[in-house]
């Protein structure tokens, strides 16, 4: 089924939002040559968000993303990103939470936009 122009816009914006944390992670790794922590934090945020949204959508009657699913996904993605950062760097600071939340926000909004961009059946 073909996507409408609105669905294509959601898909493009969602893809860019999902790619942003990975871009920052790769840029950091390229600049330092050895620091891959941002990339792993981006992966943790994306996986946490994607799992919650995919499970939430599969269990909903209408197969749509609700505000509740998005909120839970943001919380889970932030926590998985913080846990990933703590596991890799063994640091706990406000900066860790800020980066984790920013990556989780991008991953969650991007994933929600991806699910919204899917063509409707019927």
Image (cartoon, grey):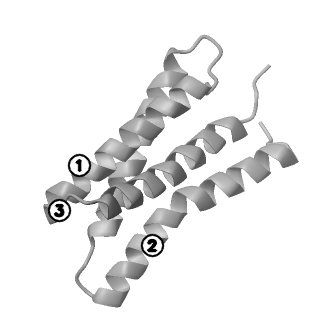
Q: Earlier in the sequence, mark 3 or mark 2?
A: 2
Establish if 105 lies above or below 40.
Answer: above
Percent x, y of residue 91? 17, 62
Q: Is residue 13 left or right of residue 43?
A: right
Mark 1 to mark 2 CA distance (whole Å): 19 Å
Q: Nearer the viewer, residue 120 or 68?
A: 68
Q: Earlier in the sequence, mark 3 or mark 1?
A: 1
Q: Which quarter shows the C terminus?
A: top right
Q: Nearer the viewer, mark 1 or mark 2?
A: 1
Residue under the image location 65 percent in, 43 percent down: 113
The residue wearing badge 2 is 24
Q: Nearer the viewer, residue 48 or 92?
A: 92
The residue wearing badge 3 is 91
Establish if 78 lies above or below 26.
Answer: above
Q: Is residue 119 left or right of residue 71?
A: right
Label 2: few (<14), some (14–19) or many (≥20) C-alpha neighbours in 10 Å: some
Q: Name which quarter of the figure residue 117 lies in.
A: top right
The residue wearing badge 1 is 83
Q: Name which quarter of the figure residue 4 lies in.
A: top right
């Amino acid at each position: 089924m073909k996507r409408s122009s609105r669905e294509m816009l959601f898909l493009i914006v969602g893809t860019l939002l999902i790619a942003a944390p990975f871009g920052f992670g790769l840029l950091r790794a390229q600049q330092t040559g050895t620091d891959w922590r941002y990339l792993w934090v981006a992966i943790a945020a994306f996986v946490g968000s994607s799992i919650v949204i995919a499970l939430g959508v599969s269990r909903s009657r209408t197969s749509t993303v609700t505000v509740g699913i998005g909120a839970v996904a943001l919380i889970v993605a932030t926590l998985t990103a913080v846990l990933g950062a703590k596991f890799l760097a063994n640091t706990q600071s406000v900066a860790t939470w800020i980066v984790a939340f920013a990556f989780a926000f991008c991953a969650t909004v991007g994933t929600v936009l991806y699910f919204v961009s899917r063509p409707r059946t019927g």
